[in-house]
Amino acid sequence: MSTASWLGCYSFPAAGALRPLRDPDALELDEDEDGSAAGCRLPAEAGCQPAGTNAASYCTTAQKLCSDADVSTSFKGGPALVSGHLFTWHMTDKMSHSDVHRTTAITSDTEMVEPYGGGTGFRFKIRNVMIDGQADVLHVRGGGSHKVSFDVLHDCSECGNAINQVIVGLAGQDRAQASVWNGKQRSGGGLKVVNADTHVEALAEDNPGPAEWVNVSCDLVVPDEPGVYSVRARYAQAYQGRLMTAEGRAISQPEYQDVLGWWKVDRPEGPGPESTIGTIIVEA
């Protein structure tokens, strides 16, 4: 890759020690806010929508089972009003085969925030997630490849001179599926090259001014098995990652494999529910 047309190039710093983030596996209440179990009434002939609620959108793949204390489901988790209570659905994550509480995608007016462990700031924020150009929750028949796009703001002054990435994948998998942003402290500012003329050369952003929101996209592959698949994101600090902005996508970039291996670094189970940015529901 020639550097003649780029705005600048940078040297890669020595690797620094990782700093732990907050525990992504910390348990949350799955009952009412007052600690009591939520009630519901779900006759088989009524389908999966609890009486007196507007929860039909959650019910496409739900099991038609209900008791006074619990609802067993296999659909997108999220709070709903049932018999006057704030109830958090139980959801079986098909990728990890474990109960996941409050695994809800971010909405248009909320942001996923990746904190900087041990510091006061954050690494990046994500908003405006769209799957296949629709919304952050997608119902599909069968698995396959799906395009995920979102806005990201990387603004990490505490990251120093490190090269950082944003990686994306599915909950419960051992590796990320895609890297979508590569750069130094701040997103925006146009294309640059880091580690130029070396074996770890890569496209990157290093905005000299205030960080800017940039739109990135990638393809994720979802298994054919019916279930709920949480799309999650986290940081990485490998030597190389892809820059999947519109400008970056115009230039051929390989998918660097080392960065995908950061999926479980400092998080043995991978990114937790707080890292969810979208949901793909594979219907039976």
Image (cartoon, grey):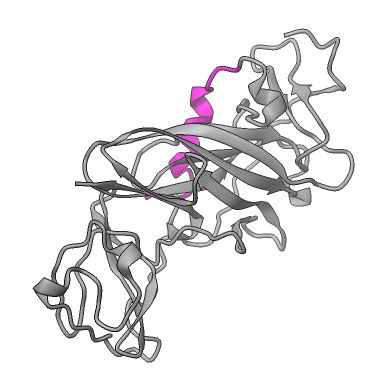
* Residue 268 appears in the picture as rendered: no
Residue 37 position in % (x across, y down)? 26, 86
User: Can you say whether 272 is above or below 217 in the image?
Assistant: below
On the picture, is 198 further left or further right than 279? right
On the picture, is 113 further left or further right than 213? left
On the picture, is 231 further left or further right than 39? right
Q: Quadrant of residue 115?
A: bottom right
Q: Quick check: is 178 in the magenta stretch?
A: no
Q: Nearer the viewer, residue 129 or 210?
A: 129
On the picture, is 209 further left or further right than 225? right
Q: Residue at x 67, y 40 (%)?
A: 215
Residue 277 position in % (x across, y down)? 50, 52
Q: Residue at x 65, y 55 (%)?
A: 116
Q: Residue at x 88, y 39 (%)?
A: 208
Single out the residue that lies furthest toward the left: 44
User: Can you say whether 190 is above or below 47 in the image?
Assistant: above
Single out the residue that lies furthest toward the front: 45
Residue 94 position in % (x across, y down)? 25, 49
Q: Where the N terminus falls, by quadrant?
A: top right
Q: Quadrant of residue 264?
A: top left
- Look at the image and give the residue range highlighted in magenta: 253-270
* Residue 231 appears in the picture as rendered: yes
User: Can you say whether 54 is above or below 255 in the image?
Assistant: below
Q: Nearer the viewer, residue 221 or 202?
A: 221
Residue 126 position in % (x across, y down)? 62, 51
